[in-house]
Amino acid sequence: MSNVTSVLLGFFVFAYALVAPMQAHASTHIVSPGESLFTISRNYGISLNSLMEANGIWDSMIYPGQRLYVPENGSSGGSSYTVRAGDSLYQIGQKFGVSYQEIMSANNLKSTYINPGMSLYIPATIPGRTAQPSGLVSRGGLFQRPAVADVGILARLITAEADGEPYEGKVAVGAVVLNRVISPDFPKSIRDVIYQYDQGTYQFEPVMNGWINRPASSESLKAAKDALSGKDPTNGALYFFATYVKNSWLWSRPLSRIIGNHVFTY
């Protein structure tokens, strides 16, 4: 073999090593220039959180040459899924037996908003894992067990805003509040989102007119618990308003769904 051929062969082997998929059974990984924790976790078929926790990393900063430990459950693999019209992360998670929070983490999503045609990596299920009971599931990693008072406030808002709406519309109103909690543009608790005062007005009319203090209906309480468990008919909406409202700014926002007499937008 000539020297030129040897050099070319060595170059192609090196190039292939850079782009070829990593083997899931590897226990360590040396960070290459241009890599991120997200791309490394996807290549090994594990969640971003798992990789960070295994290495005691609490931010996204890594550097070339850094040695990372890859958890053994990376060998369990995962799958890909193309989002279809009407899908939500909650529904996709139910289909594959994982939580929607795990899908968010594995795909580095900052909100529950997805759109048709989007490709998602679905992490593998963990054998023997049991689902968390309804109402206690973490939403976006911000809270695990909401206070009883917060559940009550959410149920009262749903009653005030959607008492005459279909049940799906009640859950959707609760989901909007929780989507705001995990959004960087809104306060970080249920109470603070509901009572947010901005530019001389409250975000929700029932807070302004006092209807928020009326007792919650049993159906609204159930809807609040369903929203807290991860159900989101709006697929990540941050706003809702009545269909008769004539506000050009609200109507100009991307449409999620119309449920009953409410329009839900991003």
Image (cartoon, rainbow, N blue to C red):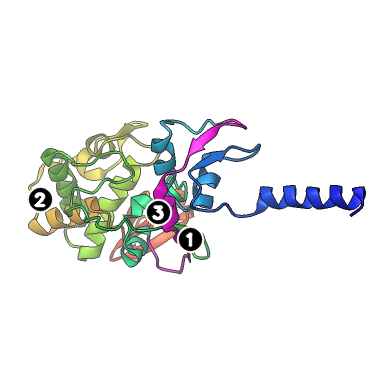
Residue linked to disc 3: 103
Bounds of the magenta segment: 63-88
Residue 255, label in figure: none
Q: Are marks 1 and 3 in contact (CB under 8 Å)?
A: no
Q: Amino acid at mark 3?
A: Ile
Q: Is residue 184 visible?
A: no
Count residues near mark 3 (Cα–Cα under 10 Å), then give few for <14, some for 14-19, many for 20+. many
Q: Is residue 53 visible?
A: yes
The picture places residue 8, in percent across and down from the top left corner, at: 85, 51
- Check disc 2 and report its element: helix, strand or loop: loop
Q: Residue furthest front?
A: 1
Residue underneath mark 1: 115
Disc 2 crowd, CA 10 A, few/some/many (<14, 14-19, 20+): some
Residue 170 lies in magenta, yes or no?
Answer: no
With respect to residue 200, does 205 lie above or below?
below
Give the residue at mark 2: 216
Quadrant in the picture for the N terminus = bottom right
Residue depicted at 49% across the width and 46% down the height: 41
Q: Nearer the viewer, mark 3 or mark 2?
A: 3
* Position of 34 relative to 124 (above/below): above
Q: Nearer the viewer, residue 63 or 111?
A: 63
Q: State how far apart marks 3 and 2 are (Cα).
A: 32 Å
Of 24 and 233, which appears nearest the observer? 24
